[in-house]
Image (cartoon, grey):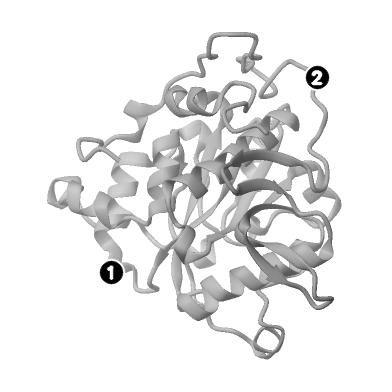
Amino acid sequence: MRQSFFSPRKLVGKFVPVKGPAQPVAGKGHASSAVRTPVKTGETLGRIGTLEVRMARNLKEVRKAQRLRYQVFYEEMSAIADAATLSSRRDSDAFDAYCDHLLVVDHASLKRNKLGRLKPEIVGTYRVLRQDVANRNGGFYTSGEYDIQSLIDANPGKKFMELGRSCVLKPYRNKKTVELLWHGIWAYVLRHNIDVMLGCASIEGTNPDMIADQLAFLHHNARAPEEWRVRAVEDRYVEMNRKPAAEIDSKAALRALPPLVKGYLRLGAFIGDGAVVDSQFGTTDVLIIMPVSELNSRYVNYYGADASRYSS
């Protein structure tokens, strides 16, 4: 991210299709007026070299993604595991059963399964949950931290999708892997006609005063406009406006933000009202809101209006 970037709104531009036969994003309603075939289980959504991004094929692959999440969240970071999580060595919850699981696999890194067969290693994952699926299964995970239902109710003609549980194996935390994950998400958004993406992003630490500059920077520079603003649930609300804008070293605060949060800002994301402390994961969460019509045209066009940049 350029150090001169202080206001995410300055980077937000309406979607401008790339040259060629690509489908435009509709000004209102769904992400595209074209009729698209939904993403299928196991479908490949893109490739870069030996890396492939696709949907999980079966429960075994979901469990491998859960083990990757455990390795990153519990072994590398500071999440606190309960007895069941320690025993299974998998990060899992009830939402995994009906979410779609986006995977990055490395065909150059083969691991033997329990049957002795060599399988490409899963090195990155994202969990996605569409509104229609959430409605049939008790709602979104994010609703435990933010009053997102008020935003959904205010936009009855739009399709929402939740992003969550994002992680990448340490040796693969590079531009190539992240770009491939986002290529997969963009393909998924287009194919399912998603209008709004949302989800929680985490800043390490559970003491808001220790990350006051980061929270205040987001409050002053990236807070959602009124029509997209969502407030943290009352009993978990943490004030983000912890410092006047004039007292913040904006460059330092921006550098300190997690790469995922900075990536969302580059895409043109908004931040919700208030943070939430997640003691189990040792983090402070902020709400990410990304209306497809407001995404930064530079990045959308980079992946292609039809998600063709890394298509196989």
Tell me: 207 left or right of 226.
Answer: left
Q: Which residue is mark 1?
A: 209
Q: Give the alpha-carbon distance from disc 1 to disc 2, as whole Å.
A: 48 Å
Considering every residue shown, the one lying at the far top of the view is 20
Q: Which residue is mark 2?
A: 35
Q: Residues within 10 Å of mark 2 (few under 14, many from 20)?
A: few
Tell me: 267 left or right of 186.
Answer: left
The residue positioned 37% from the left and 57% from the top of the image is: 258
Q: Tag 2: residue type?
A: Val
In front here: 274 or 222?
Answer: 222
* Residue 117 rendering spot, x and y as whole percentages: 80, 69
* Residue 136 rendering spot, x and y as whole percentages: 86, 50
Where the C terminus falls, by quadrant?
Answer: top right
The residue positioned 67% from the left and 42% from the top of the image is: 161
* Residue 204 rendering spot, x and y as whole percentages: 39, 68
- Give residue 139's mark: none
Looking at the image, residue 272 lies above or below residue 28:
below
* Residue 217 rendering spot, x and y as whole percentages: 28, 49
> For residue 17, which quarter of the picture?
top right
How many numbered dots are placed on residues in this image? 2
SS label for mark 1: helix
Mark 1 vs 2, N-terminal side: 2
Looking at the image, residue 67 lies above or below residue 2:
below
Q: Tag 1: residue type?
A: Asp
Looking at the image, residue 299 lies above or below residue 151:
above
The residue positioned 59% from the left and 21% from the top of the image is: 305
